[in-house]
Amino acid sequence: MFVLQNGVKIDEKGIIKALNDSMSLHKYYFDAITGQVGFIDGEKKQLDKKPIDKNRYFEIPRISEKTKISWAKDFAQEFVVSENTFLANLFVKILKKGFFGDFLKLLEKTDFIYGWTQWEYDCINKKIEDWFETISVDIKDEWEFDCDCMACQAENFNQKYGRYPEPAELIEFIKTQKIN
């Protein structure tokens, strides 16, 4: 979870949507005070004549098709190849021709779609981190310990009490938590 210096959570879903939008007339802006993402539809002429505050609003860049193809090639060559060389080579051949949509259609017919989902998510998060480094806003990446696994709950205990729990304490602590 990305957080602004003022403690406000950043709208990561909005940033991901903006990064992936292929419509060139759509403009997305990140608000460095509220952490929200704003949208302007250039097709509907919603652009005001007022200048925007460039210290507060930052246009969110797009992920190019070329970048997505590069991620997909890496996925095929690093992940798929260990399980199915033929399929990995087929993916790479399709991607070298620039057919990202065909790669996705074929991928959806395999179990590798689950690995791709995580791979793409990791690549997008790296892209977000890289972009945050280019704007003049202090942003922290904080871990969310909101699942019910023992590791997350032990960390929640540590954050609340300043120490890690004994096993019996952890079990009692988990019983008192409201898990999402």
Image: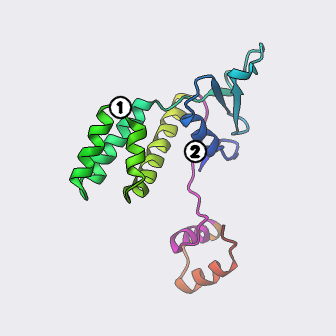
Is 25 above or below relative to 162? above
Question: Where does the magenta region start and end?
Answer: 136-159
* Apparent side of residue 154 relative to residue 109 in the rendered image (left or right): right
Amino acid on which the number 1 mark rests in the picture: Gly
The label shown at residue 61 is none
Q: CA distance from mark 2 to mark 1?
A: 36 Å
**Which residue is pictured at 74% across the width and 22% down the height?**
44
Q: Position of residue 168 (x, y in %)?
A: 57, 86
Q: What residue did someone put label 2 on?
A: 140
**Which residue is pictured at 52% across the width and 38% down the height?**
128
| Mark 2 vs 1: CB contact within 8 A | no
**Which residue is pictured at 30% across the width and 53% down the height?**
79
Considering every residue shown, the one lying at the far top of the view is: 49
Q: What residue did someone put label 1 on?
A: 98
Q: Earlier in the sequence, mark 2 or mark 1?
A: 1
Q: Nearer the viewer, residue 53 or 111?
A: 111
Amino acid on which the number 2 mark rests in the picture: Lys
Q: Nearer the viewer, residue 69 or 30?
A: 69
Q: Quadrant of residue 18?
A: top right
Element class at badge 1: loop
Considering every residue shown, the one lying at the far left of the view is: 85
**Which residue is pictured at 50% across the width and 39% down the height?**
129
Q: Position of residue 5 (x, y in %)?
A: 66, 41
* Apparent side of residue 38 relative to residue 97 in the rendered image (left or right): right
Q: Nearer the viewer, residue 169 or 143?
A: 143
Mark 2 surroundings within 10 Å by alpha-carbon count, few (fewer than 14), some (14 through 19), many (20 or more): some
User: Any magenta on residue 144?
Assistant: yes
Element class at badge 2: strand
Q: Which marked residue is nearer to the observer: mark 2 or mark 1?
A: 1
